[in-house]
């Protein structure tokens, strides 16, 4: 089992706390001129996404979390789980709803996603920053309106709902920023 | 802001501000009749303070020996006291000091210290002069000064009397104060006091001017003498401005036997903590035996003072090349 001392703390380091994997967001070194030093640390729970503050005595050690990111191709959903494949080794993995979470509404078969693995098991899925998806349903907009002002809701093939300009119609492909959920532009093809 | 790896992390104006600040400090001491001295950065002995980690190097020198360990000083205190014992009179020094395991917004493993000693003075008289030096260095003659005892601060801020409390009560106070995860920490009494001071009280010190925190618990005396009174207190003070600790001073302990006792107890504590047990400074102890004049002394962090002078919030902004670029 690997351990990190507080001297090795820095943003991005993955550690275990109370049995859960955490990512260090921010590490502040606090020390009186004469006396005990502390590390005041903000950490993100990689299972829940919650950010909490922790206080360590400098020099203490914590267990390292076996967490790393890898690019994997999304294959399909069997109704319960999402199946992914490592494009190099062709090894397949499944991820449950807790891991896929919000990514479910953006990803389509064959998309390359960032999969965070904890002890070799998918912990979270990050969709590509931009996806191209077909609109399955939206109200016909007013004819001749190309200003983009106002907008209307549109349901996409993955089930996500985004606001689009009035001139965009059912059946068209659009590019969406998955980090914000915003419409970017019309797209010719995927 | 990203800058190329070869370039300084400080803006040119901040490098000029350092030179100007050093000029004002030297002018102050020249006018006050305090002698500038230099003592070695490398020493055969090392600090015993369990909270400090010395950097060690090895030298091979004709007539001295091969591969002998030398320690980079964490403060020039012991060497300067040897000069005082030799009758140097009031002295000051501006030098780099080195501390391992310290890095952050306010910490850099090598930093500039201004240290000075006043024979015949006590800690209270020296606090007045520290305030005068800071006003001169920052060129802010109007800066306000207040003093508060360590005991008063804890009673007012946390309703806790450090002299009449224990680990259990301090741990409860830390939890109540909302210090994240306080119940997981294993600390001794001084550790809990340090935690509460740094996390709950310090930010309010020196909010509009300078605050001197003084009369520390005897267990935190370091190299200060103990004063008897309502409760026995260490004749030690720290200066805070805008919540930043800037200086630490003592009415200096001059009793050689008591000093040796404290060094030995430090070394035992270091051993208990699994830290190195460096050679203690016998030349310094011999100087105390020969006679250290009654005196007060203080060390002031110049990089932090410069941070206040320039209004920056990271020490790297006042350093030409921080360790990552050194």
Image (tube, helix red, strand yellow):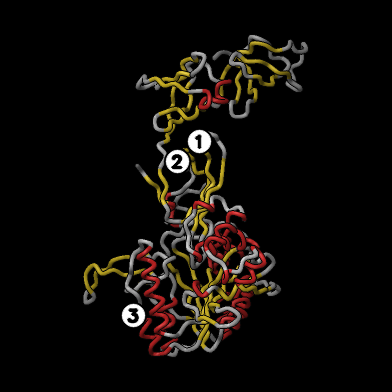
Left or right for B275, reference B66: right
Q: From what the image shows, is residue B150 above or below residue A146?
A: below
Image location of residue B132, percent across then percent down? 63, 78
Would you name the residue on which mark 3 appears? Answer: B282
Q: Quarter of the image holding residue B242?
A: bottom right
Residue A14: assigned label: 2
Left or right for B8, reference A178: left
| Element at label 3 | helix
User: Which residue sits at x=47%, y=30%?
Assistant: A123
Mark 2 — on which chain does it sit?
A
Image location of residue B68, percent across then percent down? 26, 69
Q: Nearer the viewer, residue A187 or B108?
A: B108
Q: Nearer the viewer, residue A64 or B283?
A: A64
Q: Is residue B271 visible?
A: yes
User: Which residue sits at x=44%, y=52%?
Assistant: A6
Mark 3 — on which chain does it sit?
B
Image location of residue B84, percent across then percent down? 44, 86
Q: Is residue B10 visible?
A: no
Left or right for A87, reference B220: left
Query: Gap between marks 2 and 1, in whole Å?
Result: 9 Å
> How many residues crowd mark 3 within 10 Å: few (<14), some (14–19), many (20+)?
few
Q: Nearer the viewer, residue A13 or A110?
A: A13
Query: Gap between marks 3 and 1, in whole Å?
Result: 53 Å
| Marker count (numbered) | 3
Mark 1 — on which chain does it sit?
A
Image location of residue B320, percent across then percent down? 49, 60
Marks 2 and 3: same chain?
no
Residue A92: assigned label: none
Query: Gap between marks 2 and 3, in whole Å?
Result: 46 Å
Would you name the residue on which mark 1 appears? Answer: A46
Q: Are circles 2 and 1 on residues that touch, CB within 8 Å?
A: yes
């Amino acid at each position: 089992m690997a351990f990190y001392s507080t001297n090795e703390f820095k943003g991005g380091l993955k550690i275990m706390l109370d049995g859960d994997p955490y990512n260090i967001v921010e590490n502040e070194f606090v020390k009186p001129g004469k006396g005990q030093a502390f590390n005041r640390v903000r950490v993100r729970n990689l299972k829940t996404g919650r950010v909490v503050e922790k206080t360590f005595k400098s020099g203490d050690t914590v267990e390292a979390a076996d967490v790393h990111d890898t690019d994997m191709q999304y294959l399909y959903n069997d109704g319960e789980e999402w199946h992914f494949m490592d494009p190099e080794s062709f090894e397949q993995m499944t991820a449950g709803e807790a891991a896929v979470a919000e990514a479910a509404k953006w990803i389509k078969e064959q998309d390359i996603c960032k999969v965070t693995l904890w002890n070799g098991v998918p912990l979270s899925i990050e969709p590509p920053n931009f996806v191209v998806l077909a609109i399955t349903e939206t109200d016909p907009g007013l004819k001749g309106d190309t200003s983009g002002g106002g907008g209307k809701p549109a349901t996409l093939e993955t089930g996500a709902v985004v606001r689009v300009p009035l001139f965009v119609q059912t059946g068209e492909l659009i590019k969406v920023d998955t980090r914000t959920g915003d419409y970017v532009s019309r797209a010719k093809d995927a | 802001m990203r800058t190329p790896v070869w370039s300084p992390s400080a803006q040119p104006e901040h490098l000029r501000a350092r030179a100007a600040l050093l000029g004002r400090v030297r002018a102050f001491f020249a006018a006050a009749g305090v002698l500038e001295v230099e003592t070695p950065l490398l020493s055969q002995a090392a600090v015993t303070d369990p909270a400090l980690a010395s950097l060690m190097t090895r030298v091979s020198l004709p007539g001295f020996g091969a591969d002998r360990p030398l320690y980079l000083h964490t403060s020039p205190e012991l060497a300067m006291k040897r000069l005082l014992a030799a009758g140097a009179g009031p002295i000051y020094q501006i030098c780099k000091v080195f501390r391992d395991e310290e890095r952050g917004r306010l910490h850099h493993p090598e930093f500039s210290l201004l240290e000075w000693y006043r024979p015949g003075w006590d800690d209270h008289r020296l606090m007045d002069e520290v305030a005068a030096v800071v006003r001169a260095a920052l060129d802010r003659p109007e800066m306000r000064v207040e003093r508060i005892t360590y005991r008063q601060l804890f009673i007012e801020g946390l309703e806790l009397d450090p002299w009449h409390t224990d680990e259990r009560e301090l741990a409860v106070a830390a939890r109540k104060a909302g210090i994240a995860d306080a119940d997981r920490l294993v600390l001794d009494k001084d550790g809990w006091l340090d935690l509460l001071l740094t996390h709950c009280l310090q930010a309010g010190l020196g909010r509009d001017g300078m605050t001197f925190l003084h009369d520390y618990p005897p267990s935190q005396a370091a190299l200060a003498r103990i004063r008897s009174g309502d409760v026995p207190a260490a004749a030690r003070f720290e200066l805070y401005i805008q919540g930043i600790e800037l200086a630490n001073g003592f009415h200096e302990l001059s009793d050689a036997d008591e000093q040796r006792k404290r060094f030995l107890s430090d070394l035992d504590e270091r051993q208990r903590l699994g830290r190195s047990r460096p050679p203690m400074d016998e030349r310094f102890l011999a100087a105390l035996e020969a006679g250290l004049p009654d005196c007060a002394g203080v060390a002031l962090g110049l990089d932090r003072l410069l941070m206040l002078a320039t209004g920056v919030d990271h020490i790297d902004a006042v350093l030409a090349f921080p360790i990552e670029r050194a």
